[in-house]
Image (spheres, rainbow, N blue to C red):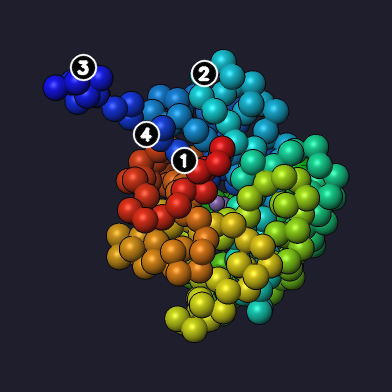
Amino acid sequence: MPRTLGMKCCTTPAPMPRHDLHCHSTHSDGLLAPAAVVARAKERGVDVLALTDHDELSGLPEARDAALAAGITLICGSELSVTWRGITIHILALGVDPENATLTDGLAGIRAGRSTRARRIADALASAGIHGAYEGAMRYVTSERLISRTHFARHLVAAGHAREMKDVFARYLTPGRPGHVAHDWATLSQAVGWIHAAGGQAVIAHPGRYRVNAGGMRRLLAEFRDTGGDAIEVLSPSHTPAQYVEFATHARVFGLRGSCGSDWHGPGESWMDLGELPDLPMGVVPVWKDW
Ligand code: AMP
Ligand code: MN
Ligand code: MN
Ligand code: MN
């Protein structure tokens, strides 16, 4: 047997780097500061981490320093709020230049709408008999630049209006419920355009969460691809194993790459921890293929 062949079969292949490309810090609605998120990712065996705070890039310098010290790779990211045909969808930006003015201006525009929306959420809750929710939510806000439904949810749970986070969304904060208000975020083409202007890839986050039927999902994916979108988040704690297969198939059919992310928000709040996802299904081109 040739020597090289003999060596080859005795060499253990290097393990695939573990990617977690979706998580949050105190710069949006996560519970830990960026450096603490990075430290936990390192502990949990993540090799490549994307910090993707909602509509925000301000946590990235701290995360980058922490990643350098910990010896893991940080991907600069964000999770952009978008309105598509009247529903809210989330588009992850991966590998962006955080200094890019087109992106930073776009995100500032999205964030600007959050304060008035928060007042409207509080007014809607007050009409349903829950008073003082704005002040209550503000006690949970960790960045003066960003207030989200999560902060309302934490307050409502603490105030005894629901037992846990998922109940409070189902009872008060989702479409058709007393504390939900309609809001116009960025458009799909704006979000994809800003992400590309900043040199990044655009990924549809947790597609299994959107309230669309099969035809609506195909229209969303087709429009996303035609706008220049790059990938689908195939693996997400919002998906069942059957949906892993379903979205892997969509990725192949629509010519999109696949991504994976724990969407981790903090200890005790997210049922999947950093780095906990399985490998991408066979046949899906990873979003990181050319990194
Ligand atoms: P916002 O961007 O202000 O509309 O807030 C959206 C955030 O609320 C998401 O990023 C999640 O962190 C959180 N969220 C939405 N739905 C749920 C749910 N059913 N259970 C727990 N958290 C949720
Ligand atoms: Mn969130
Ligand atoms: Mn999301
Ligand atoms: Mn998220």
**Side (left or right) of 189 relative to 6:** right
Q: Is residue 140 shown above or below 15?
A: below
The picture places residue 130, in percent across and down from the top left corner, at: 61, 66
Amino acid type for the residue under numbered disc 1: Asp
Res. 209 in view: no
Amino acid type for the residue under numbered disc 3: Arg
Q: Is residue 166 shown above or below 222?
A: above
Q: Is mark 4 within 8 Å of ligand 4?
A: no
Amino acid type for the residue under numbered disc 2: Ala
Q: Which mark is residue 3?
A: 3
**Side (left or right) of 129 relative to 234:** right
| Distance between the alpha carbons at the discs numbered 4 and 3 | 26 Å
Q: Which of pointers 1 and 3 lies earlier in the amino acid sequence?
A: 3
| Distance between the alpha carbons at the discs numbered 2 and 3 | 38 Å
Judging by the rendered image, the residue that carries numbered circle 2 is 70
| Distance between the alpha carbons at the discs numbered 1 and 4 | 13 Å
**Side (left or right) of 261 relative to 155:** left
- As helix, strand or loop, the secondary structure at mark 2 comes to helix
Q: Which of pointers 2 and 3 lies earlier in the amino acid sequence?
A: 3
Q: Which of pointers 2 and 1 lies earlier in the amino acid sequence?
A: 1
Q: Which residue is painted at 69% across and 42% down in the image?
A: 96
Mark in front: 4 vs 3: 3
Q: Is the residue under label 3 in contact with that under label 4 (CB below 8 Å)?
A: no
Judging by the rendered image, the residue that carries numbered circle 1 is 20
Residue 222 position by quadrant: bottom right
| Distance between the alpha carbons at the discs numbered 2 and 1 | 16 Å
Mark in front: 2 vs 4: 4
